[in-house]
Image (cartoon, helix red, strand yellow):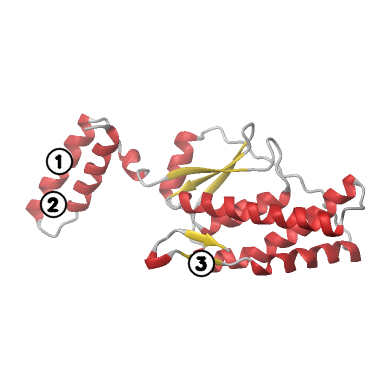
Amino acid sequence: MDHKKALEKIKKCLRLAASSNPHEAAAAMRQARALMEKYQVGEADVLMADVMEVAARSGSKVTPPQWEASLAGTVARAYSCRVIFIAGPGNWSFIGEMAEIAGYAMTLLLRQVRQARRDYIADTLKRCKPATKTKRADMFCDAWVWSVRTKVQEFAGSAAPSTAVEAYIQKHHPELQNGTAKDRNASKGRLSDRALNDAANGVRAASGVQLNHGVAGSQTLALN
């Protein structure tokens, strides 16, 4: 029996240990303890057994744009995950019991917002200077993400990450450092009419984003 199968067996025994039959519960607990000792499985390992870590590719290797960081945070909260940015490969790493769905959702949402960004640049910003084009496209994406945020939360919920998730992070990512996203439109002043127009177009572009559960009660996520 390998470590993974042993862990599944231990979890099954621990579930049986909650039986109302005292003899069955005691036997199951003894078996769980014996397996934990034999395969060197600690209580923390059992706690983290259902936690997964799933990556979604970022568009940046080192410093992601603010709108992308906001989207990652929205998806993480919706699926009760923690999310960290892995510089170098440039990945958003979702950690939690529903990390697989979160990573899938992030990948699809990023695909959609990037396509919307390309279309907006081609249709509306093609005559702008490169720096101006990037800033205005970021404003468009900020608004796109803001518009989608409510839909994601309504679709998936917003429960806090479990204690198992925090335990996983402490074990596997003990040296996390605070990072910053790139906000090209950071300003304390009033938004210009042009910026407001870019934002309005971003909201409009996101209006067609729909989130649906898979068929037959499946938890597979589909975005149209």
The amino acid sitting under disc 3 is: Asn
Q: Secondary structure at mark 3?
A: strand
> Where does residue 10 sit, x and y in percent of width and height?
23, 42
User: Mark 3 or 1 closer to N-term?
Assistant: 1
Disc 1 crowd, CA 10 A, few/some/many (<14, 14-19, 20+): some
Q: Which residue is mark 1?
A: 31
Q: Identify whether 169 is placed above or below 74.
A: above
Horizontal placement of 147 versus 29: left or right? Answer: right
CA–CA distance in space, label 2 to label 1: 10 Å
The amino acid sitting under disc 1 is: Gln
User: Mark 3 or 2 closer to N-term?
Assistant: 2
The amino acid sitting under disc 2 is: Ala
Front of the two marks 3 and 2: 3
Residue at image location 19% in from the left, 36% down from the top: 35
User: Mark 2 or 1 closer to N-term?
Assistant: 2
Report whether residue 41 is seen. no
> Where does residue 86 sit, x and y in percent of width and height?
60, 36
Q: Which residue is mark 3?
A: 212
Horizontal placement of 203 versus 158: left or right? Answer: right
Q: Quadrant of the N terminus?
A: top left
Count of residue discs: 3
Q: Secondary structure at mark 1?
A: helix
Check contact, mark 3 vs mark 1: CB within 8 A: no
Residue at image location 77% in from the left, 57% down from the top: 119
Report whether residue 43 is seen. yes
Q: Please tell me which residue lies in front, 69 or 210.
A: 210
Instruction: Name the quadrant containing residue 125.
Output: bottom right
Checking the image for residue 25, the label placed there is 2
